Amino acid sequence: MIIFPAIDIIDSKPVRLFKGDFKTAERVADDALETAKSFEECGAEWIHMVDLDGSVQKKRVNSETFICVAKNTSLSVEIGGGIRTLEDIDFYVNNGIKRVILGSVALKNPALVKEAVKEFGGVVAVGIDAKDGFVATEGWTESSNTHFIDLAKQMEAIGVETIIFTDISKDGTLSGPNIKQLLEINDAVSCNITASGGVTDINDIITLRDSGLYGAICGKSIYKGTLSLKEAIEVCK
């Protein structure tokens, strides 16, 4: 299982949120590149980054920060937030980003996802963020009547290879991931499933690993010191 240390970005600075609420934004480091380099030193091969400004403004906002990390570390960078067009994907791919995550557009414009997969293949992943089992969009500010499993199956049919699943109620809470929903989505589709939200300690990592998931995103647990990134990477080798 791949461990994805996470850096969420507002105004070019690393922050963490509590349950996706922007009012709870807490700055967790001074510099994204230095933080990424510290993850690299721990043995990370991938990094998960989110343009929180972009997710609300529906456009690329902090792209320079992501490109800087991609160019100045050996990390494979996956990013989400504010990616709405094929031009956005092309821009990031041409600037060294290894995986681009489509979020809100997966629900609102599945035809775009289909076109993106056709053009960019496995570079395109889909982020499914759910609250009480139903998909939320636009930086988690809008809810829908679509069940997360239904959207996952639709994305699988389109050809999406990788899905990042977040239970919003768990994100940033250090209360453990939603194993039940993660197992449901992992069993429902053949896509690679990455768990996001709630990871607290090494026991959560072991549980996710033993559940047969593709990856786990770790953010607040690393910053708060409840999880050793190095240990997490070691147990997943």
Image (tube, rainbow, N blue to C red):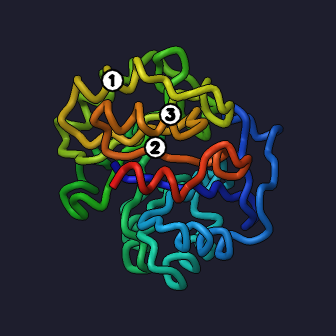
Q: Is residue 213 visible?
A: yes
Numbered badge on residue 29 = none
Residue assigned mark 3: 203
At label 3, which amino acid type do we have? Asn
Identify which amino acid the numbered label 2 is placed on: Gly
Residue 45 shown left or right of residue 67 in the figure = left
In terms of sequence position, does the residue under pointer 1 or pointer 2 come before the other? 2
Rendering coords of residue 223 (x, y %) = 70, 52
Query: Dot 1 corresponds to which residue?
Result: 183
Could one spot residue 88 in this view of the protein? no
User: Residue 191: which quarter of the image?
Assistant: top left
Of circles 1 and 2, the one toward us is 1
- Closest to the observer: 170 or 209? 209
Position in image of residue 189 (x %, y %): 21, 30
Within 10 angstroms of label 2, few (less than 14), some, or many (20 or more) residues? Answer: many
Q: Is residue 109 above or below residue 64?
A: above
Depth check: 115 or 227 in front?
Answer: 227
Please name which of the two marks, 1 or 3, marks the residue nearer to the observer: 3
Q: Residues within 10 Å of mark 1 (few under 14, many from 20)?
A: some
Rounded to the nearest whole Å, what is the CA distance between mark 1 and mark 2?
21 Å
Q: CA distance from mark 1 to mark 3?
A: 17 Å
Quarter of the figure with residue 234: bottom left
Residue 103's disc is: 2
* Secondary element at tag 1: helix
In the rendering, at what x and y percent does residue 58 appear? 58, 51
Q: Residue furthest bottom?
A: 72
Mark positioned earlier in the residue sequence (3 or 2):
2
